[in-house]
Structure formats: structure tokens, C-alpha cells
Image (spheres, rainbow, N blue to C red):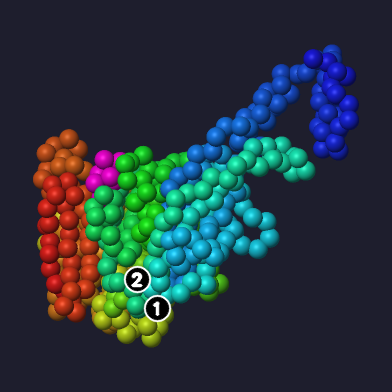
């Protein structure tokens, strides 16, 4: 094709593009250079130019970062789309309200995931909702963009948190994108039907692109991929959830806490939470990476030590809030354990020494920063992961809080060697007879490994 054969009647944008192609043609004797042809081919494949007639696939909605008056909804899409959430106080969706994604100004569109935050809700109240996703079949030019037919999800429901909500939680941890144990864990979660789930870190391994994060958090390849459509999920990062060239942008897939919960000096505490769930106060902390900031493996990227100090200040403030202070049962969630017995093999690995072959089995720094606050404020339980092996540490006279450590994704083996102590768990907590009951489920062997009142 020669440059002068291009059809006349160009728009301003097309005219500018054509001028560039014309100049390139002149340099190559009138023919389109290989670079220009490659650029045009890339343009045709660019997903941000529209779905181009390819049917849009929609993932199940996922409830994220729940609050007393807010709820986040995220879902996967397979092409360029915009989306809204409709919600109502009845399953027939009468008089449903419509909420767009994003905040003020331009509504976000994306080719992988959409997010909507519902606000102004009532505490401890049941709502029904559905997602509506509209594909852009063509977005080559804003003046000629074309929309496809809306895709409407089924109706799901959720109940907001608050003092009037049912005090019942479950914890999963160290799922590491291992789909067989993940399916076991989420099937148990659906069976137990808690008010909320805490995903307590190491959901990922190393995340180099957004599509990987979408698969892990929004569209897992398991039978119960809709596990979080009716059960809201808190997310607390584990050390692996900070690894990979893309992972610093995970809020594009996992909604952080509502901005109104954070002051300017606490803006980076994106997933920390302190909320009432009935007689419980649920508090989420982030232990960060498992090596010192100066460790050579981080290439200067780690800044977790000031992050932990900032959380100590935040923690003091949260326990000073009247509704948190008044809770009869205070539970803290974080990924890396805060305690190890001096006699145990874990004890030397405290995350302080810089050793290229070492990592933290427990965090001495977090213990020193947060432990005294937990003792002083009457925390009953700390729920952790990281070690891939179930453990329970009862409270002592010196440490007033108990610690439970959940299992990992191994299915009865440790690096190929049979090990009956390696199994995935679901940690469950609820109130019975005015006491906190802690139950740990081994979902590999379908048994209970701990059932204890605290």
C-alpha cells in the first residue's frame, strides 16, 4: 500500500497520524516501513482500544475491605469495560441505588478488573447487590467509542460490620496460589459462613503482572471461585505479597481501606483495620517483609522498619477509640508470628540479623513495638501464619495474649518428604456462652486440631 492511497476525510487525530506515516513513507521510497506496520499491528492488539467483538467474560464479584458503613466490590473482566454496582435492602432489588467505580471526575475503566466502593451504608445491616459491566467494543477514538451490551451478575448479599453484627470470623493464610489447598480452605469457609474472612498474608508468591494478581484475588481457577461474593474479606499482606515488579500496585485489584478511615500521616496504612464485629474488636496489622531493610536482597527497596513504627502509633490510637476499648474480646491479625519460645528452633530466626540465608520465623521488632500495647489493652488472641505449620501458644504471666499460627499449602509433605504436620487450616473464632471460642480446622484431613475457649 502506498501512502497516497489512504482514504481522504481524516479527523484531526487521524490527520496527525497520517502525516507521521507519510513522512516515514518518504524515507522508505513510498512504502510503509516495517516499524510502522508493526506499530499498526500492535495498535490492533492493544486491549485498551476495545474488545473488538470478543465476548466479555466477567468474574464473580469479590467483597473487600468491609466496614460498618462501607463495602468494597471488585471483579475481574476480560476486556475494556466500565462497571457499576446496584444495591438494595431487598433481594428483588427494588429501588436499587447505582454506584459507579472510582471517585469524582473520570470514571475508571480497565481491561482486567473493576472496583466499586459502597458508602453511606447502615451498620450491621444486610444488603443485596449485583454488578453491571458494560464493554467498550471500540475505544480507538473517544468521539467514536462504542459500547456493547451490559453483562449483569446474579444477586448476592452481604452484611455490614458493627456492634450489632454476628461475632464470627474465619482466617485463611499462606495460600500461595496453590489451588488445591486453596479450594479446600474456601470450601470450608463457605460451609462455616462467617461474618468476615481475614486473608492473613502470602496470598501470592512473586507478582510480575496484574493478570496474576487478578487470578489470585478475584478469579481463582477453583470450583468455589465465588467464595467471597457473599462473605467480605479483609486482606493483610504477608512477606510474599511485597515481591515482584508489579505488586506495589496491588490496590488496583485489592481495594484498600476507605480513605475516611486514615489521616494524611497514616495514608500508607492502606489495609490496616480496627473494627467492631459484635462483642469482638478485630485489628489488622502488617508485619511487612521477613528480613531487615538493609538486607542486600531488597536492593534498597525495603522501608518496613518505619512502617512498623508507624503502625505502633496507629495501634495505640485504635485501642483508645471508645468502641474498640469497650470490646470484650480483642483479636489481632498479622502474618509473621510475634512470639517464639526461647527453647524452640524458631527462636534464633527473629528477623533482626542480616543473614543472606536467613529469614524471620517470628518478628522481634514487631513484638517489641506492639507486644506491650497488646498486653496493656487486654488483647486475648493474635492470629498469624507464615510458618506453614499449625501451632498454639497459650498466654503466660509475662505475655497475656495467646497466639495461634495457621498451616500452609503443603498437603502432608515437606519438600517431598511425608510430614503429617503440614496441612492447610481455617482458623475460626466466634462467641459462645459469652466467651471467645477458637477452633482450628485441618482442611486436608477434615478434622479439628484445636477447640479452645479463651
Q: Give the x, y percent position of residue 365.
A: 32, 66
Could you tell me which secondary element the residue under label 1 belongs to?
A: helix
Q: Is residue 327 visible?
A: yes
Q: Give the x, y percent position of residue 310.
A: 44, 71
Which residue bears the numbered disc 1?
A: 318
Could you tell me which secondary element the residue under label 2 belongs to?
A: strand
- Of the residues under marks 2 and 1, which one precedes in the sequence? 2
Q: Is residue 289 visible?
A: no
Which residue bears the numbered disc 2?
A: 283
Residue 338: which quarter of the image?
bottom left
Residue shown at 49%/61% (left/top)?
93
Residue shown at 60%/42% (left/top)?
149
Left or right of 236? Residue 72 is right
Q: Residues within 10 Å of mark 2 (few under 14, many from 20)?
A: many
Q: Main secondary structure of the magenta part?
A: helix
Judge by depth and name the residue closer to the eye, 413 or 74: 74
Q: Give the x, y percent position of residue 162.
A: 38, 75
Left or right of 298? Residue 171 is left
Residue 15 colored magenta?
A: no
Q: Are marks 2 and 1 in contact (CB under 8 Å)?
A: yes
Judge by depth and name the residue closer to the eye, 411 or 81: 81
Residue shown at 44%/55% (left/top)?
155
Q: Is residue 345 above or below residue 59?
A: below
Residue 183 colored magenta?
A: yes
Quadrant of the rendering where the N terminus is positioned: top right
Q: Give the x, y percent position of residue 28.
A: 81, 16
Residue shown at 68%/60% (left/top)?
105
- Which range of residues does the magenta coloring cover? 178-185
Q: CA distance from mark 2 to mark 1?
A: 9 Å
Residue 342: which quarter of the image?
bottom left
Quadrant of the rendering where the C terminus is positioned: bottom left
Amino acid at each position: 500500500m502506498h501512502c497516497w492511497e489512504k482514504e481522504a476525510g481524516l479527523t484531526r487525530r487521524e490527520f496527525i497520524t497520517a502525516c507521521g506515516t507519510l513522512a516515514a513513507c518518504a524515507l522508505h521510497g513510498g512504502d510503509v516501513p516495517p516499524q510502522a506496520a508493526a506499530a499498526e499491528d500492535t495498535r490492533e492488539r492493544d486491549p485498551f482500544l476495545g474488545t473488538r467483538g470478543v465476548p466479555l467474560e466477567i468474574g464473580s464479584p469479590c467483597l473487600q475491605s468491609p466496614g460498618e458503613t462501607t463495602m468494597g466490590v471488585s471483579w475481574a473482566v476480560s476486556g475494556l469495560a466500565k462497571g457499576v454496582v446496584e444495591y438494595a435492602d431487598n433481594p428483588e432489588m427494588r429501588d436499587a441505588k447505582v454506584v459507579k467505580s472510582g471517585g469524582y471526575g473520570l470514571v475508571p475503566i480497565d481491561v482486567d478488573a473493576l472496583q466499586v466502593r459502597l458508602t453511606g451504608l447502615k451498620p450491621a445491616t444486610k444488603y443485596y447487590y449485583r454488578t453491571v459491566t458494560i464493554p467498550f467494543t471500540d475505544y480507538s477514538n473517544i468521539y467514536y467509542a462504542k459500547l456493547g451490551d451490559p453483562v449483569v451478575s446474579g444477586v448476592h448479599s452481604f452484611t455490614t460490620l458493627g456492634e450489632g453484627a454476628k461475632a464470627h470470623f474465619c482466617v485463611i493464610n499462606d495460600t500461595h496460589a496453590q489451588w488445591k489447598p486453596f479450594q479446600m480452605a474456601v470450601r470450608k469457609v463457605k460451609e462455616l459462613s462467617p461474618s468476615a474472612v481475614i486473608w492473613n498474608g502470602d496470598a501470592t508468591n512473586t507478582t510480575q503482572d496484574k493478570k496474576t494478581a487478578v487470578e489470585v484475588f478475584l478469579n481463582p481457577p477453583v470450583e468455589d471461585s465465588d467464595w467471597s461474593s457473599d462473605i467480605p474479606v479483609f486482606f493483610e499482606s504477608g512477606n510474599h505479597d511485597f515481591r515482584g515488579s508489579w505488586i506495589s500496585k496491588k490496590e488496583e485489584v485489592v481495594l484498600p481501606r476507605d480513605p475516611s478511615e486514615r489521616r494524611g500521616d497514616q495514608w500508607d496504612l492502606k489495609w490496616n483495620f480496627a473494627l467492631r464485629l459484635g462483642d469482638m474488636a478485630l485489628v489488622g496489622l502488617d508485619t511487612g517483609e521477613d528480613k531487615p531493610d538493609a538486607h542486600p536482597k531488597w536492593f534498597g527497596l525495603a522501608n518496613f522498619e518505619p512502617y512498623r513504627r508507624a503502625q505502633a502509633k496507629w495501634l495505640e490510637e485504635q485501642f483508645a477509640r471508645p468502641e474498640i476499648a469497650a470490646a470484650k474480646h480483642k483479636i489481632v491479625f498479622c502474618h509473621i508470628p510475634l512470639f517464639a519460645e526461647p527453647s524452640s528452633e524458631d527462636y534464633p530466626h527473629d528477623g533482626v540479623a542480616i543473614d543472606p540465608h536467613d529469614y524471620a520465623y517470628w518478628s522481634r521488632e514487631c513484638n517489641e513495638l506492639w507486644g506491650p500495647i497488646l498486653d496493656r489493652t487486654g488483647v486475648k488472641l493474635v492470629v498469624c501464619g507464615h510458618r506453614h505449620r499449625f501451632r498454639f501458644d497459650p498466654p503466660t504471666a509475662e505475655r497475656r495474649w495467646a497466639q495461634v499460627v495457621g498451616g500452609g499449602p503443603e498437603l502432608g509433605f515437606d519438600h517431598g518428604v511425608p510430614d503429617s504436620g503440614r496441612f492447610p487450616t481455617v482458623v475460626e473464632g466466634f462467641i459462645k456462652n459469652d466467651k471467645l471460642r477458637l477452633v482450628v480446622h485441618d482442611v486436608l484431613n477434615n478434622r479439628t486440631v484445636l477447640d479452645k475457649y479463651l
